[in-house]
Image (tube, grey):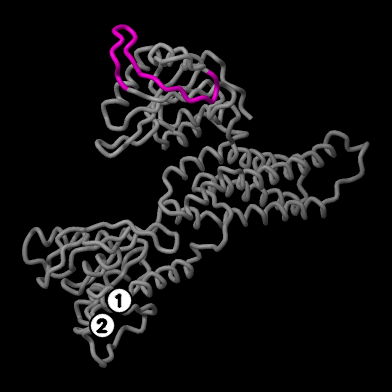
Amino acid sequence: MPSILPPTRPTIAAIATAIVPQQGSVGIVRLSGGEAVAIARNIFRTPGQQVWESHRILYGQVQQPQTGKVVDEALLLLMLAPRSYTREDVVELHCHGGMMAVQQVLQLCLDQGARLAEPGEFTLRAFLNGRLDLTQAESIADLVGAQSPQAAQMALAGLQGKLAQPIRQLRAHCLDILAEVEARIDFEDDLPPLDETWVRQQLMDVAAEVAQILATADRGELLRSGLKVAIVGRPNVGKSSLLNAWSRSDRAIVTPLPGTTRDVVESQLVVGGIPVQVLDTAGIREAIDQVEQIGVERSRAAAQAADLVLLTIDAQAGWTEADQIIYDTIVQQDNPRPIILVMNKVDLLGDGAIALPHSISTVVKTAAAQGQGIDALEQAILNTVHSQNLQAANLDMAINQRQAAVLTRARIALGHVQEAIAAQLPLDFWTIDLRTAIQALGEITGEEITESVLDQIFSRFCIGK
């Protein structure tokens, strides 16, 4: 674990809450570092005999030290080292929400010698001071950015160490294997020969656990970034009505006139615990004016960028030549997207059957104007996700892209050890790849990490975290 930071590290300050004009009731300014308490005492005045003790809340006013001008009425929360988020002295000033109060309080802190925190610097200090390991730090960012209850639960699992624990056990296992191998190198005459069968089995056990953890990567990415779904089709087939019924809002303008939607309209939904970004696109046809042409081009681009396409047709009109052209365009892309055919306006269809291409396996019938068929559509989306092996049930944790890349390195290194054993190479060759695997596993938890990797990870955090 990295060593504790020296007490001379500059005190940092930042706004730790989202500030939205006229919509936030409370805004928090956070300080961390050796001068945090001194800065707070300079700008915060408490009435009566309130005691400045750790983990107490004080009431008072934030004032300009030189003039005594009151900037805000606030609460002060004092958390002294090491019982704080960063394991440094931490002070939080809970001010009135809005822009001006917290901005002025932050500026007073900076005027008193604090430095504006960099993105993720509070959490970085928590990591460097041993308060968190790297998987827990990354889970905090995931929790802040969670877009669904399942994503939040997954982040909490990581924060509670459910990822770090198995990774540490795997690393310890590899260290034990390395110790047995190196002992035979250093004390060959004093120890019995190394049991190659035992080493092979131990490596297979580790590799199997690594593969099991790696299998959670797609699920984790899906929960973190969500699924992008594009609704495409001819004009006036009910795409906008479908979006409105699905989102239970009037996100898109609906009229009987073809070509009403001229641009891509977005809506954020959650389906089965998965965040879904739905894109309602302009009807694809030969545009009659330049504005519609731009909208059609954006529709095609949205279909190419989506993870899943909802090809929507008018049940009354049936499968038309124009529908076939749109379908062919989608399936002929370099990386074809899964397609769900949405047969809309089935309430107006009657008893007639529609002939559809045999290559379309998933069909959902809807009457979007009446709000019918939405549950079936969501289930079809989840089934498609399942069929692509993107969702695994009952996961306690899931790794992110960085962790997956590092864990892949560990798996490859373990494979190289097996190859060295099979080729009867000297024991020194075994240790090279074993050390590579051990180093990779250490990078996941932060036991072995470079400054550049830390910069890359924490630069994605918000400033107040």
Residue that appears at 39% across and 79% down: 361
Q: Is residue 302 above or below residue 51?
A: below
Please give the residue where the numbered disc 1 appears in the rendered image: 372
The residue type indicated by label 2 comes to Val
Structural crowding at the residue carrying mark 1, measured as other residues with C-alpha within 10 Å and reported as few (<14), some (14–19) or many (≥20): some
Mark 1 vs 2: CB contact within 8 A: yes
Q: Nearer the viewer, residue 355 or 148?
A: 148
Magenta segment: 53-72
| Foreground: disc 1 or disc 2 | 1
Q: Nearer the viewer, residue 99 or 68?
A: 68
Structural crowding at the residue carrying mark 2, measured as other residues with C-alpha within 10 Å and reported as few (<14), some (14–19) or many (≥20): some
Locate residue 369, reporting x and y percent: 22, 74
Q: Is residue 334 above or below residue 445?
A: below
Where does the N terminus fall, quadrant-wise? top right
The residue most toward the top is 66
The residue type indicated by label 1 comes to Gln
Label placed on residue 346: 2
How many numbered discs?
A: 2
Locate residue 131, reporting x and y percent: 59, 31
